[in-house]
Amino acid sequence: MLKKNSSSKEGFTLIEVMIAVVIISTVIMALLEMFANNIHIFSTLTKKTQINQYSSFFISNPDVGLEDEDALTLYDLIDDFDIEDDLRREL
């Protein structure tokens, strides 16, 4: 017959509880950081999507004239400005 030691207690020690709290806190902090990064990426993506929609509207709108053959080219836009020839070639 096995005899139980009367001094042994069933349960967790303070060190085990503290280690568990540290591990759980680390996991929660990592999840919060991932959540914050996702919010930042989503808001940036939303702004870029809006800019693309506005640009597409102006490019495809016949009233603006950017899709017409008679529309201004980039060279026509910079022709009046006095800029260096190298920069003009790049544009």
Image (cartoon, helix red, strand yellow):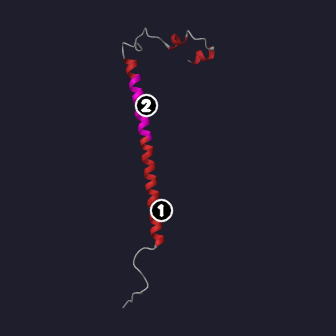
Residue pointed to by mark 2:
48
Residue at image position (54%, 12%) is: 78
Q: Which of 68 and 63 is in front in this view?
A: 63
Classify 73 as above or below 23.
above
Residue at image position (61%, 14%) is: 83
Residue 46, disc: none
Compute the Cα span from label 2 to label 1: 39 Å
Q: Do the residues labelled 2 and 1 touch (CB within 8 Å)?
A: no
Classify 12 as above or below 22.
below
Q: Where's residue 40, x and y in %?
A: 44, 40
Q: Give the range drawn in magenta.
A: 40-55
Mark closer to the observer (2, 1):
1
Which residue of the protein is positioned furthest toward the bottom in this rendering? Answer: 1
- Magenta segment main secondary structure: helix
Amino acid identity at mark 1: Val
Residue 22, disc: 1
